[in-house]
Image (cartoon, helix red, strand yellow):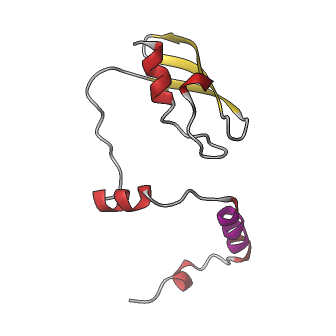
């Protein structure tokens, strides 16, 4: 498989730190053996770097298996990314949460 295609595929990935897409020019192929590729990525947005090991095969697309329906997938794909405030809110909630899950949901 051509390195240009690999770089283009990796540019669809988002940075795990800030969520910005990687630019193809910031994806560097270190090497590969058969379908296993090793790459480095650099995020221009937050200046973070990462190492990626990816199995990339040519052929027909793999069917996505998920617990979400198509409607749910569509709904959540347009949702904003989880931010720092969301994580802090969850941290505060869990810190105070006593473990009684039944209290979180209305009785049917």
Q: Residue at x 53, y 60 (%)?
A: 80
Residue 68 picture quarter: bottom left
Which region shows up in magenta?
85-93
Residue 96 picture location, percent across and down: 73, 77
Relative to the observer, which residue lies in front, 91 or 81?
81
User: Is residue 76 depicted above or below 51 in this figure?
Assistant: below
Residue 49 picture location, percent across and down: 70, 30
Q: Residue at x 68, y 78 (%)?
A: 98
Relative to 94, is 11 on the left or the right? left
Relative to 5, is 58 on the left or the right? left
Residue 70 picture location, percent across and down: 29, 57
Residue 48 picture location, percent across and down: 72, 35
User: Is residue 103 depicted above or below 28 in this figure?
Assistant: below
Q: Would you say residue 75 sits in the magenta stretch?
A: no
Relative to the observer, which residue lies in front, 77 or 69?
77
Question: Where's the N terminus, which quadrant?
Answer: top left
Relative to 101, is 58 on the left or the right? left
Q: Residue at x 30, y 61 (%)?
A: 71
Residue 57 picture quarter: top left
Relative to the observer, which residue lies in front, 82 or 98?
82
User: Is residue 88 depicted above or below 100 in this figure?
Assistant: above
Relative to 3, is 84 on the left or the right? right
Question: Where's the C terminus, which quadrant?
Answer: bottom left
């Amino acid at each position: 498989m051509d390195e240009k295609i690999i770089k283009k595929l990796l540019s669809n990935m988002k940075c795990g730190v800030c969520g910005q897409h990687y630019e193809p020019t910031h994806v560097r192929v270190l090497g590969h053996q058969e379908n296993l590729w090793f790459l480095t990525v650099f995020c221009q947005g937050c200046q973070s770097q990462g190492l990626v090991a990816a199995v990339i095969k040519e052929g027909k697309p793999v069917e996505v298996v998920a617990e979400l329906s198509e409607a749910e997938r569509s709904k959540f794909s347009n949702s904003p990314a989880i931010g720092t405030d969301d994580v802090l809110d969850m941290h505060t909630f869990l810190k105070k949460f006593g473990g009684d899950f039944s209290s979180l949901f209305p009785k049917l």
